[in-house]
Amino acid sequence: MGESVNNLAVVFTAQAKYKEAEGLYKRALAIREQALGPNHADVGQTLNNLALVYLAQAKYTEAAGLFERALAIPPAQGNRGKRKGVNGCFRHQPERKEKHRNGQRRANHEQRHELSKLSATHDVQHRPRQTRQTEGDGSEH
């Protein structure tokens, strides 16, 4: 259930519905921590996703704290460091596995694109306006 809640939050994040995504990520985090323990890779994924939502909302302190928590989780053991769920779900269905990977890449690309647009918008809105000096700058009018 934690994975489904997390995935729904990913959808809301992609739609820039950050309040809804934040609530779902918090719910997914609670479910995953209780079911898997605080040092599981899936908990780290949810921490990272929630941090990205905070980053998109310019909540930098909260985002940094969650990124630090996610980084403190040891790498996953077995499956050569990959998430067990992705390898296990499609082990006998390579075409579904590739389709899942392509969909995940597209979702990641779209999320990065949205975050870059937000970042650009944030920079423009908060950049001090440059004023032209007309007196005493030595230019002829």
Image: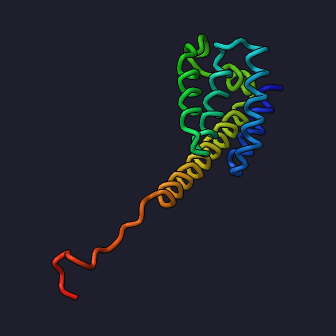
- Place of residue 32 in the rendered image (x, y in percent of width and height, measured from the top left): 75, 20
Q: For residue 92, say whether it is visible.
A: no
Given residues 141 and 98, the one toward you in this image is 141
Q: Who's the residue at 61% across and 30% down the image?
A: 48
Q: Is residue 7 left or right of residue 138?
A: right
Q: Nearer the viewer, residue 36 or 92?
A: 36
Seen in the picture, residue 56 relative to 121 is either above or below; the reply is above
Task: Please give the name of the residue rendered at 65% of the width and 40% of the height, measured from the top-left corner.
Answer: 104
Q: Is residue 118 above or below residue 64?
A: below
| The quadrant where residue 98 appears | top right
Q: Identify the image's colour scheme: rainbow, by chain, secondary structure or one colour.
A: rainbow
Determine whether 45 is above or below 111 in the image.
above
Q: Quadrant of residue 53?
A: top right
User: Viewer-proximal residue, 137 or 103?
Assistant: 137
x and y percentages locating residue 92 in the rendered image = 74, 25
Name the residue at the right extreme: 1
Residue 136: in sight, yes or no? Answer: yes
